[in-house]
Image: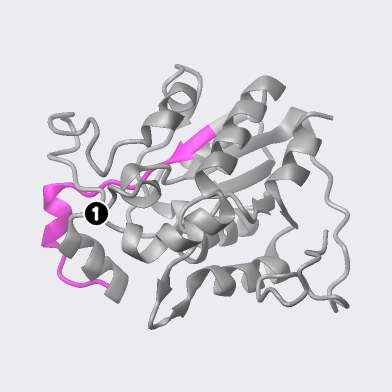
Amino acid sequence: MSNPKINNIYADPISPSLPNTNFKLDLKRAALVVIDPQIDFLSPEGVTWPFFGESITENNTVENIESLFASSKKAGITVAVSPHYYYPQDHEWNFGGGLEKLMHKIGMFDRKGSLTLEGFENSGADFLPRLKKYILDGKTIIASPHKIYGPETNDLSLQLRKKGVSQIILAGMAANLCVESHLREFLEQGYEVVVVRDATAGPRAPEGDGYLAAIINYRFIANALWTTEETLDQLNA
């Protein structure tokens, strides 16, 4: 659906060159996957808010993620979370990209260890409090942590396959980083993937607008790019 605000840099092109994929959600084989719904990303108390807060606020990201959780639970589809944690040993890596270096420097997603919850509750690595009732209901899949950006290093795809999932509704953080990396890997593994464009957000930095970069790539590679409203219509059909 085209954005009526055609002067908005995030608006869909008036005359797109790419064909419509005609993607349609099949609730019998669909899952909601939410990436990094954690305090360090989604709360003003999180360490990345200076970079992501503006985009999160503009997109109404937190509220939209919550709506997706609620409607997905009501629809009875599989719901999964792909979290991001760093343990003390991860800070001993010999090399890393620029953002990796920054994340380690600011203590993003830090935990005391992989086998302890000491200091975890309400830390930056913890889930956003308003989302916990959906995540900690005993039914949501909480995958092992991804370590860089994509799901190659966790058990998320295995968990989804074991539930018979072949379609994924993708939301969470961050648009041009973990969300895009999950999208690309899932596509390579043969899933159909729709990205919910206003249930994510990207960084604003001197290096560029990460959200805009992601939206452009989503248009080219995702099976569909929907708003939260469009996704809820499919979930509630």
Q: What element carries label 1?
A: loop
Question: Which residue is pictured at 22% across the width and 49% down the height?
Answer: 86
Q: Tell me if residue 90 comes above or below residue 155 in the rendering.
A: below
Front-lying residue, 179 or 206: 206
Residue pointed to by mark 1: 108
Asked whether, in this view, residue 106 is left or right of residue 145, the answer is left
Asked whether, in this view, residue 40 is left or right of residue 42, the answer is left
Question: Which residue is pictured at 62% across the width and 23% down the height?
Answer: 73
Whether residue 3 can be seen here: yes
Question: Which residue is pictured at 29% across the width and 50% down the height?
Answer: 46
Q: Tell me if residue 74 comes above or below residue 212 in the rendering.
A: above
Front-lying residue, 81 or 47: 47
Q: What percent of the width, then of the height, locates residue 198?
A: 62, 53
Q: What percent of the width, then of the height, locates residue 91?
A: 14, 58
Colouring of the image: one colour
What amino acid does circle 1 point to?
Met
Q: What stretch is highlighted in magenta?
A: 80-96
Give residue 197's quadrant in the image.
bottom right
